Image (tube, rainbow, N blue to C red):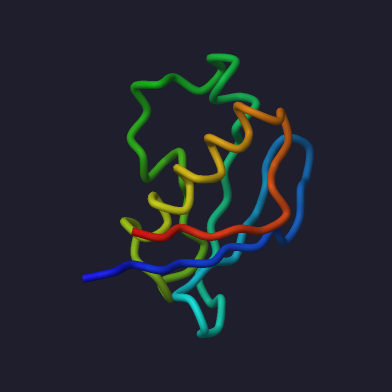
Amino acid sequence: MAICLNFELVTIKGTIAEYRFGNCLKELDGIFEIDLPNLISGEISMETPIDEVVRLKNNSQTQSMANRVFGKIYKHYLEHNEYPAKGGYYA
């Protein structure tokens, strides 16, 4: 079973980014927020539960889908030191 998700940056407030995401070719109706600078710097412990790192703002998509998108954003941030404007997860 293939998984295809797209995501798009909505806003950045300080170090916190808000993203919308959803299944490919459908509305990006899921929303979550993350704070990668504070996670990477250690201000947010790597022992913090993932649902507190990737905070869903609505129930339109699942936590596991948000976590997959988070992985792509996290890798991009480590490489480029900035939040990506948009992208996708394909598996």
Q: Residue furthest left?
A: 1
Q: How far across and how far down the image is residue 47, in percent?
A: 34, 22
Residue at 60%, 32% in the rendered image:
36
Q: Residue placed at 52% from the left, 62% from the top?
A: 57
Q: Is residue 53 placed above or below 56 in the rendered structure? A: above
Q: Is residue 35 left or right of residue 15?
A: left
Q: Residue visible at 34% across and 65% down?
A: 62
55 over 39 or under it: above or below = below
Q: Position of residue 46 (x, y in %)?
A: 40, 21
**Residue occupying the far bottom of the picture:** 26
Residue 15 falls in image quadrant: top right
Answer with the quarter of the image where residue 52 lies. Answer: top left
Residue 65 position, x and y percent, is 37, 60
Location of the C terminus by quadrant is: bottom left
Towards the viewer: 90 or 62: 90
Determine the residue positioned at 56% across, 17% down: 43
User: Relative to residue 73, is residue 39 depicted above or below?
Assistant: above
Q: Position of residue 12 (x, y in %)?
A: 76, 48
Count of numbered marks:
0
Residue 60 placement, left or right of 75 = left
Query: What is the quadrant of the N terminus in the image?
Result: bottom left
Please give left or right for residue 60 compared with residue 33 in the image: left
